[in-house]
Image: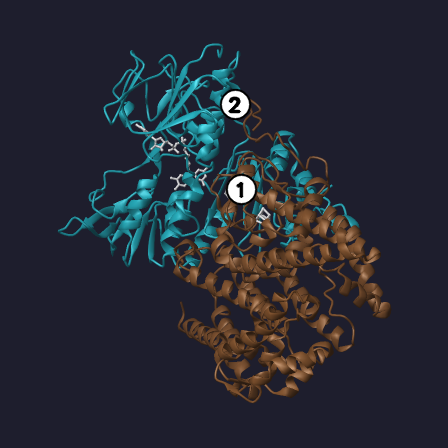
Chain colours: A cyan, B brown
Amino acid sequence: MNDKTQKIVIIGNGIAGITCARNIRKRDENSEILVISGETEFFFSRTALMYIYMGHMKYEHTKPYEDWFWEKNNIKLKQAWVERLDYGNKTLHLDSGNKIIYDTLILATGSVPNKFNWSGQDLKGVQGLYSKQDLDTMEMNTAGINRAVVVGGGLIGIEMAEMLASRKIPVTFLVREKNFWDNVLPIDEARLINKHILEHHIDLRLGTELKEIEGDESGLVKSVVTDKGETISCQFVGLTVGVSPNIKFLQDSALETKRGVLVDRFFKTNIENVYAIGDCAEFHEPPASDRKNIEQVWYTGRMHGETLAYNLTAENPVAYQPGMWFNSAKFFDIEYQTYGLVPNEDKEGISSFYWESETGKNCLRLVFEEKSQRLLGANSLGWRLRHEFFEKAIEKEWTLEKVLKNLHKADFSTEFFEKFYKKVFKKYENETGKKIALEKQSFFHRLIGSRA
Amino acid sequence: MKINQIIGLIIFILGLFSFSVIPFLGTYQLEKEMVEAKVKEEHQEDMLRILEPMYGEEYMSNFAFVSDFNGYFDEYNEALKANEDWDNVIWDDYAFDLTKAATQGAVADNPNLYLAISVGLAVLGGLIYILPMYRNEPDGIKNDGIYFSSMKSRGLLGIITGTWLILFYIILYWFPEYLTNLVVLMDPLSILLSGNPASQWFLYGFIYTLAILVMGIRMFRKYKGNAYQTIRTASVMFFQLSFAFLIPEILVLLNKPWHDFKNIWPLDYSFFYDYRMEGMLSSGALGMFMLIWGIILIIIGVPLFTYFYGKRWYCSWVCGCGGLAETLGDPYRQLSDKSLKAWQVERYMIHGVLVFAVLMTAVTIVNYFMEFGLLGQATDQLHSVYGFAIGSAFAGVVGTGFYPFMGNRVWCRFGCPLAAYLGLVQRFKSRFRITTNGGQCISCGNCSTYCEMGIDVRWYAQRGQNIVRSSCVGCGVCSAVCPRGVLKLENGEEEGRINDNPILIGNKSITVKS
Ligand SMILES: Cc1cc2nc3c(=O)[nH]c(=O)nc-3n(C[C@H](O)[C@H](O)[C@H](O)COP(=O)(O)OP(=O)(O)OC[C@H]3O[C@@H](n4cnc5c(N)ncnc54)[C@H](O)[C@@H]3O)c2cc1C
Ligand code: SF4
Ligand code: SF4
């Protein structure tokens, strides 16, 4: 496919689009690659937006590559908004009125925050958080305020609560679920996080939904009303109730879309030479039994980009096939990691072993199939685990006991941190009557930090 | 900020203010006896005559005193130089000793009182400010607002602090005669420890140690809950207080040469200098031990420990420069330059200094054994160039004075020849690496931002590559600040340590080599 030079145009300089561009360039020196994006001139890490607001970093620090990188790798960048596509003439129409012709088009336009037609959702001081512009708006909207309300108990919601708290702005956090993020987290983990949120003096309202947002005469938000009839006065409302594919400008055209741009396992859309990857793509069929049609995380965007780049430059394209599910997050001070399958509710034939430290800041859940005892997944809070270990243990169908026996190899926590294994084994023994012992390491091995 | 912290800050600033003002207090009056006591036999006659006009005259400031002193002294020397009468020129610098002897007034009369209202208040205020930090807050990363802080992000406060430090170093190294009042404050303690009155180096060592201790306590607060940071900080505090400050003074009390047992050549660049060798060789068994221990550290200690633990065993656990950087310098760690360009400059500079130090030492040693004229002069020249450019200007003025401008490891990163040596071992023969955790990196950049050595940690982490870099001092902060648990400092098997073509796990469609 890469004997002739072609012009590849990518819309969106997020992780998906940029990974794709970089990987095409690695395998194909000649094609022209142009990345068009409206949000920022250079690729930055969206996941780091919160740290800019919190003063941990400046915008500059969130750029994973230095500015000279793109020219050196002959990847052209253009900051502009694409307004309309003409697939017949393979032409993009930009907001400036300029046109761009492509041979291959890759859509990597990411997401937009959800809004659910609440009354008052367009008042000044009400916003979501997705883009750099949203962050700038938030900076202005939160200057000098004395209460903020965050609506939606998901990953971005808790980040927003943390951001505001870092500026000493009192936060009321409305969470529809009974416990924080319990549509994903099992109840023990969710409760552990509830406690931690309270410890940070967040006014956490579980099982509470937003009914409407009220404004004053000047169009500024002044309060929210909850489904319990309570009115909470505030000068800022963060709406963080999930995201949806950013495809508004693509709808009503020949391109097939549903919630996102519909693609097959090769990221092909219904139109020849047009592909979609990252948050904006929607698979006809989920790529694996434990996955959704739309994958909206950082590393899936990266994997989509890698795979499409390969397919555009290789003789034999391969279908996208993600491995074991994994993800991570941080809830204020508590890190979260998850590997494989960890259902939030009881499931037939599946059991789990759960351990929590006495401080309530660390836990481990190992999910296994009851019959075979083989490991299906793991969750941890406040305990860093080794990705490689769980990929192997799950793929090789290790039993729960084998996993426990090798727990020290799964440990990825910092040197001199408390080793939790003994406590985990004790709990396991209490529950099952079975004793687990680690192989003893010699003093010398411990001294030199040998892993074997 | 809590009210008591504000009070602490005010007390600290008062202390710092007194410290800055004290040098300019008091009067100065030179007497004949002082010249007799302080000046070497061979210069006495001349000096007594040169300075005669000053005897008994009361100077109201050190500026006036030093200016007169220099006037008379230079007049004498210049005349000799003009006649090329080199043999009679006085090359020794008596300005500091004589000014100190001539120092009079309230400060000299009540050194303890003035010590208390300067250094004492600064320490007290510092502690009042530091101890309540993060109290009642859960353990975790405390980086909120760093980039809004004028002090920590090259704002006005940072610039003032940096300027103050730079000035202090310049005066300390090259114009100590203006600091005699401060040195006088230290006399009681110095006499207690070593039996001798204080020099400007004692003053420096004392403040340096206090800075590490007080700011070390700040580290305990800031990184509370992080065992690695806590233990590492306790270690640098211990080594500074005992090995760098107390033990050398006690050695002097016992009539042995001043010696810091943890300072290793080529950081300790004068280790093989004539006077140091003579000092050690003439100090019996202990002196012999100093020499042998020093050499063992260089040829066995460094490679062996670095093989097992990486250079961190020294740079962020033991070293005094590292100790100051990791405590006093911690608020500035994010200011290091992460660009590829900076890395290139760094490699030229640090290895350049290493080569310079090795060559200079080689010449020194050859000269020590052969002792012939020309080489002797070359050695002296080399020593003074190195001492000026590297030992004082780079390690001191730039090394510490630039904390608020270029981060806390400017010296360690661009200039320290020992760091270069340790780094070579770490890069090519060591079990140390920072392991990255599979595909979990989200490229957020916290690790790179907070790496004091300016390593672009994210570059490696996001492609699943272990970080094996000669400059990494193993401070562990990248690992601490990573919000996704991606980085782990490890000493492990050598196999698989360097993975230049890593595979990011997670994608089963293809294996992507980054
Ligand atoms: C605050 C926040 C925190 C997050 N934290 C995590 C996390 O910790 N872990 C995790 O896995 N995921 C996280 N995510 C999700 C993750 O960031 C996204 O899944 C990922 O960035 C999506 O990448 P993408 O390349 O598909 O799209 P994007 O990064 O959204 O990039 C798309 C780009 O295309 C541009 N664009 C769109 N339309 C047009 C147009 N018409 N013309 C020109 N340009 C256009 C957009 O402006 C945007 O810059 C977070 C998201 C947010 C908002
Ligand atoms: S790479 Fe990490 S451990 Fe090494 S110096 Fe930088 S921050 Fe410290
Ligand atoms: S701090 Fe962690 S997640 Fe962020 S870029 Fe560094 S390694 Fe990746």
- Tag 2: amino acid: Lys
Q: Chain of mark 1?
A: B
Picture residue at 51% right of the left edge, 14% below the top: A317
Can residue A204 be seen here? The reply is no
Question: Which is more toward the observer, B455 or A230?
Answer: B455
Q: Quadrant of the N terminus of chain B?
A: bottom left
In the figure, residue A122 lies in which quadrant?
top left
Question: Which is more toward the observer, B199 or A392?
Answer: B199
Disc 2 and disc 1 on one polypeptide chain: no
Above or below — where is A102 with respect to A450?
A: above
Above or below — where is A150 with respect to B292?
A: above
Residue occupying the far front of the picture: B83
Picture residue at 62% right of the left edge, 55% below the top: B390
In the rendered view, does A305 fall on the left or right side of A430?
Answer: left
Q: Secondary structure at mark 2?
A: helix
Q: Marks 2/1: CA distance?
A: 21 Å
Q: Secondary structure at mark 1?
A: loop
In the rendered view, does A449 fall on the left or right side of B482?
Answer: right
Question: Which is more toward the observer, B494 or B338?
Answer: B338
Picture residue at 64% right of the left edge, 77% below the top: B198
Residue B351: x percent and y percent? 65, 45
Residue B238: x percent and y percent? 67, 66
Residue occupying the far left of the picture: A217
| Label 1 CA crowd tier, 10 Å (few <14, some 14–19, many 20+) | many
Label 1 sits on residue: B456
Can residue B203 be seen here? The reply is yes
Residue occupying the far right of the picture: B285
Label 2 sits on residue: A26
Above or below — where is A137 with respect to B266?
A: above
Residue A192: x percent and y percent? 48, 52
